[in-house]
Image: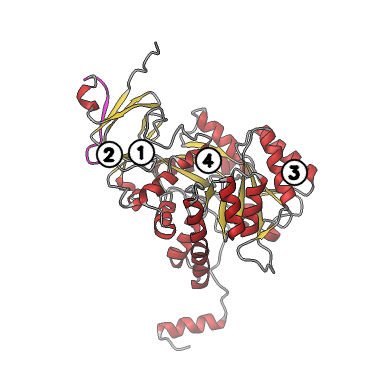
Amino acid sequence: MTEQPTPTLLIHGGTVIDGLGNPPVRADVLLAGDRIVELAAGLAARAAPDLPRLDASGLTVMPGLIDAHCHISFDEPNSNDELFFHRREGLAAIIAAANVSKLLAAGVTGFFDADSLWEIGVDLRDAIEAGIVRGPRMTTGGNALLTSVGGTAGRLIPDEGRRGYGVVVHSRDDIVREVRRQIKIGVDWIKVHVTGLTPRQRVKGEVQVWSYEELKLVCDTAHELGTPVVGHCRGASSTRDAARAGFDMILHATYMDEAALEAVVTHRVPIVPTFTFQANLADHGAAVGASEGIRKLFQKEITDSAVMLKRAFDAGVPLLCGTESGFSLTPYGDWHYRELEVFVRDLGLTPLQAIAAATSANAFALGLAGETGAVAVGRLADLLLVDGDPSRDVTVLGDRQRLKQVILGGELLNLPAIPPRRDPPGWRAPHYGTQILRQSVVSRLHKHNGEPT
């Protein structure tokens, strides 16, 4: 006879959103160690009187959020110049270890670090798992594989070698060698920058800079060693070829055509649209000096891609929530709920579908599908108690005052207030302003203020 685990905590009186898409129910949640062992109404009445209890009356009990596209080592740069030339390896690691607490405070109990400066992601993950750093569950890529076209960084990327988060590969031997090297050091995912920007491109989105044969070689090499592959794909052909080549997850998948849609549906490749960056720039870019033109451009990427992504979802392709947190437009701790809002507002998912995309579906990015991301018997007790009803309005998850308790592996986290910090010397790229100070600019300013020019 199997011995039943000893209960360690009873969460009672709350309304449970299970993260699996089911309607909310009133239920108590019983934990034993790091697992959920029972879920039912009325548990409080028959539980041992000395069992520790957490009163969730008036609160929603739901899975902790999982962010399937984060960049924990970047520390919110304003530009690739800042990211590539103003970071120091040791200091970047220390700051990344401090920044993970911001994710916990925002209700994030797991995240995927898509690519990393140096190999900080591997070391930080290991430090979290060893209990040296307090942070969410974490999986990580290493340096993103690039061709010399340069991904989205263009001429800032060298023709060979490493810079920032990327490593340039040229030949089949280069590809195999680098994939094997990264797996040797312990990455959870191999990331490929399948598309990039070129100065005179003629395609929507970004240009595919890898051949199908090269993409398949990455997948075959990684899969032989039991490691999944994820691709940055902004464009129809790249999404199609990544799906056909065997990619296990695709970031963005914007501007899909019918052939790309057919490929992702056939292969059921999970997609992480990661529209938070675009939505923040489109909706709030004026607050940081972004031009109206760039705001409209980023909104157009959402608008032009939403229909095909929803068609993929309706055909059974998992959509996962990722936020690109780690840039100046997506700082840590502020916007981890935002992708749910975009899924509801722009893609047409229900709030419960969006919550599932940010919890149970996202467990795939952690390598923990079926293990976390749901309030269900047998799952890891990674939970969030919320003052409000996210099944009606997902934006309540963005109000820090409404996040009443974070539980990670059955442990109630006492999260201290995060103090303000200064940047170390040379950490940011200096800016004199947002535009060139021409006489015409001064004249317009005087005219706007009613002053003589």
CA gap between label 4 and label 2 equals 27 Å
In this rendering, would 343 be left or right of 86? left
CA gap between label 3 and label 2 equals 50 Å
Q: Which mark is residue 18?
A: 1
447 vs 64: above or below: below
Identify residue for label 3: 175
Q: Which mark is residue 365?
A: 4
Q: How many marks can you see?
A: 4
CA gap between label 2 and label 1 equals 9 Å
CA gap between label 1 and label 3 equals 42 Å
Packing grade of label 1 (10 A; few <14, some 14-19, many >=20) is many
177 vs 54: above or below: below
Q: Mark 1 near mark 3, Cβ–Cβ under 8 Å? A: no
Residue 54 coordinates in the image, percent (x, y): 26, 31
**Which residue of the protein is positioned furthest toward the left in this rendering?**
45
Of the residues tagged 4 and 2, which is closer to the observer?
2
Q: Mark 2 near mark 1, Cβ–Cβ under 8 Å? A: yes
Q: Secondary structure at mark 3?
A: helix
Assign the magenta stretch its main secondary structure. Answer: loop
Of the residues tagged 3 and 2, which is closer to the observer?
2
Residue shown at 55% from the left, 43% from the top: 113
Q: Secondary structure at mark 4?
A: helix
> Magenta residues?
49-59
Packing grade of label 4 (10 A; few <14, some 14-19, many >=20) is many
Q: Which mark is residue 25?
A: 2
Of the pair 102 and 9, the residue shown nearer to us: 9
Of pointers 3 and 2, the one earlier in the residue sequence: 2
Packing grade of label 2 (10 A; few <14, some 14-19, many >=20) is some
Tag 3: residue type? Answer: Ile
